[in-house]
């Protein structure tokens, strides 16, 4: 069994920064990709950023230049540095892990609220 534990969400003013972190535990020693998705009220879950174990990244257009995703292959962790936050970034953020040859896993979600 694999568990993903997220941390770092909270309330921040527009223009501020937050850093989300996600750590995997359990029967996992490598992965194909890890990423962050988000879901705002009344909207579908959407990809925010994805990073492969090889370091390739993919960002949603709405966060390019503001968010940076990093990973630690040995520790099976992924982080998301979010700068210049906007009210539209308000959502529940979910960590995602795609192992090699296995079903993906999701974290429980962490709330990010951008408001003055």
Image (spheres, rainbow, N blue to C red):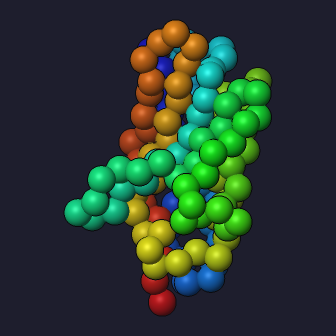
As displayed, is residue 33 above or below residue 50?
above
Residue for point 53% across, 78% down: 86
Q: How many marks?
A: 0
Q: Is residue 98 left or right of residue 67?
A: left
In front of the other: 48 or 116: 48
Q: Is residue 73 left or right of residue 63?
A: right
Res. 22 in view: no
As displayed, is residue 109 above or below residue 113?
above
In front of the other: 47 or 25: 47
Q: Quadrant of residue 29?
A: top right
Residue for point 52% across, 10% down: 101
As displayed, is residue 88 above or below residue 33?
below
Residue 1: horizontal and vertical position, in percent?
Answer: 44, 15
Residue 49: horizontal and vertical position, in percent?
Answer: 58, 48
Q: Quadrant of residue 17?
A: bottom right
Residue 89: horizontal and vertical position, in percent?
Answer: 48, 69
Furthest residue toward bottom: 116
In front of the other: 60 or 21: 60
Residue 95: horizontal and vertical position, in percent?
Answer: 50, 41
Residue for point 46% across, 83% down: 115
Furthest residue toward left: 42
Res. 106 in view: yes
Q: Is residue 30 left or right of residue 86?
A: right
Furthest residue toward front: 61
């Amino acid at each position: 069994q694999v568990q993903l534990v997220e941390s770092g969400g909270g309330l921040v003013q527009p223009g501020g920064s937050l850093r989300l972190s996600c750590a995997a535990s359990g029967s996992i020693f490598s992965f194909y990709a890890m990423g962050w998705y988000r879901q705002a009220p009344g909207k579908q879950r959407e990809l925010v950023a994805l990073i492969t174990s090889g370091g390739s990244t993919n960002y949603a257009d709405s966060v390019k230049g503001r968010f940076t995703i990093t990973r630690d292959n040995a520790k099976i962790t992924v982080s998301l540095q979010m700068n210049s936050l906007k009210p539209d970034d308000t959502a529940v953020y979910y960590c995602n892990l795609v192992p090699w040859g296995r079903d993906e896993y999701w974290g429980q979600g962490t709330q990010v609220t951008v408001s003055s």
